[in-house]
Image (tube, rainbow, N blue to C red):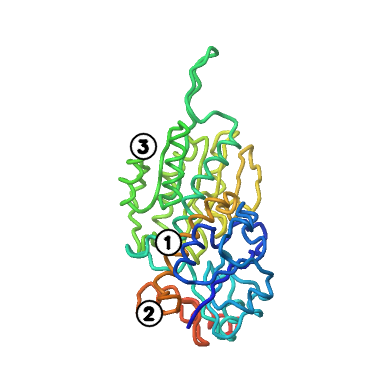
Amino acid sequence: MPICVAVPKELFTHERRVALVPETVTRLTKQNISVLIEKDAGQQAHYLNDAYQGTEICEANDLYQKATVFLKVQPPSVEEIEKLKSGDIIIGFMSPHNHLDLVAKMRDKNITSFAMELIPRISRAQSMDALSSQAAIAGYKAVLMAAQMASIFFPMLTTAAGTIRPAKVLVIGAGVAGLQAIATAKRLGAMIEGYDIRPETKEQIESLGAKFVNVGVDAKGEGGYARELTEEEKQQQRDVLAKHVAAANVVITTAAIPGRPSPKILPTDMVEQMAPGSVIIDIAAEGGGNCELSQPGETIVHNDITIHAPLNVPSQMPTHASEMYSKNMFNFLSPMLKEGELAINWEDEIIAGSVLTHDGEIKHSATQTLMEQQGGNA
């Protein structure tokens, strides 16, 4: 069937990204796909209405009446789902573990939904991996936040007043965000240490010019994520890590697993061993934070140590965040399109792995299990 793709304006508080940028819209229209953009949808990312050439800029009500495929960044609101028609398709970050009520509503309304964070992390899907593209932005931005909040220089400086020693930065977690943080702190001239409980990250950390902190724990898990540590392993991790945290001027924590609480790596007693004026940037705050003292969305000072736990960090760089996300979205959507029509291959590993609701059912097993545990209807 001929399809019409729509990009609604994001309603989520403080969300500045947009699902499609003009360049990507042009690529879709060249495939004979009609694209509708809600008025001012890209404004906060600095993509103004006039930049979307060859598309129709319309109000929200017209958008939902005309389109069949909806592309978003954040999960749809209850009001947005009510505007969708049975059989419509919606794609975006869904955070199903946090929004079971929305999942149930999409299921009951026969909406087909795809969650960008559920796309399998396989080689063929790298160009669609929105988790990685947005994590790279968060890692970069975390270092800039730290440099702004720190009371010291990052690089070594030789001045008439003497030599200023470089800042000591410890990055915890060597996923995409952590590695980008290491690279950015290195560019700013700091002395860097990197830590991850997955020993295979040692080479990656060292390749960026940082020293690897080895705590003697191998926690390699499935899907590129770390497994849960035993209590004995957690204590061993704390004992070794405490010395490196105490010596750091800046600690950046990035250890997060989608759909699960962030592991508490920095307990209060470890934080209190840091020097006055030190800074902690906890970008795992979406899952509660890696620091025991973190208050998601807030900046606090404890024992003269600043603990900053920002939320939705990629949205603070909305132009490039939107550009990268838009490319991920295009690469995910394109295989479903054939000569201007929708042709979904449900046998495809990527499609099957990322579908959340379809045909009046919850297709993602972990979400279905969670739904059952909480009463079946959220």
Q: CA distance from mark 1 to mark 2?
A: 19 Å
Label 1: how many Cα within 10 Å (few below 14, some 14–19, many 20+): many
Q: Compared to 269, does 188 lie above or below?
A: above
Q: Is residue 47 left or right of residue 175?
A: right
Q: Residue at x 64, y 37 (%)?
A: 304
Q: Are marks 1 and 2 in contact (CB under 8 Å)?
A: no
Local crowd at mark 2 within 10 Å, few (<14), some, or many (≥20)?
few
Res. 152 visible in picture:
yes
Q: The C terminus lies in which quarter of the figure?
A: bottom right
Q: Quadrant of residue 81?
A: bottom right
**Mark 1 falls on what kind of element?**
loop
Question: Where does label 1 land, which residue?
Answer: 129
Vertical placement of residue 87 versus 100, above or below: below
Please state the horizontal and vertical placement of residue 90, each as a whole percent of the image. 54, 74
Pointer 2 with pointer 3, Cβ within 8 A = no
Q: What percent of the width, then of the height, locates residue 211?
A: 36, 38
Residue bearing the label numbered 3: 209
Q: Judging from the image, what secondary structure is the residue with disc 3 in?
A: loop
The alpha-carbon separation of the residues under discs 2 and 3 comes to 44 Å
Labels 1 and 3: the sequence-earlier one: 1
- In space, the residues marked 1 and 3 are separated at their CA atoms by 26 Å
Residue 240 image offset from top left, x and y in percent: 41, 44
Say what amino acid the circle numbered 1 marks: Asp
| Identity, as a three-letter code, of the amino acid under mark 3 | Gly
Specify whether residue 296 is in view. Answer: no
Tell me if label 1 and label 3 are in contact, CB under 8 Å.
no
Pointer 2: what residue? 345
- Identify which residue is drawn at 55% across, 40% down: 144
The amino acid at mark 2 is Asn
| Sequence order check, earlier mark of 2 and 3 | 3
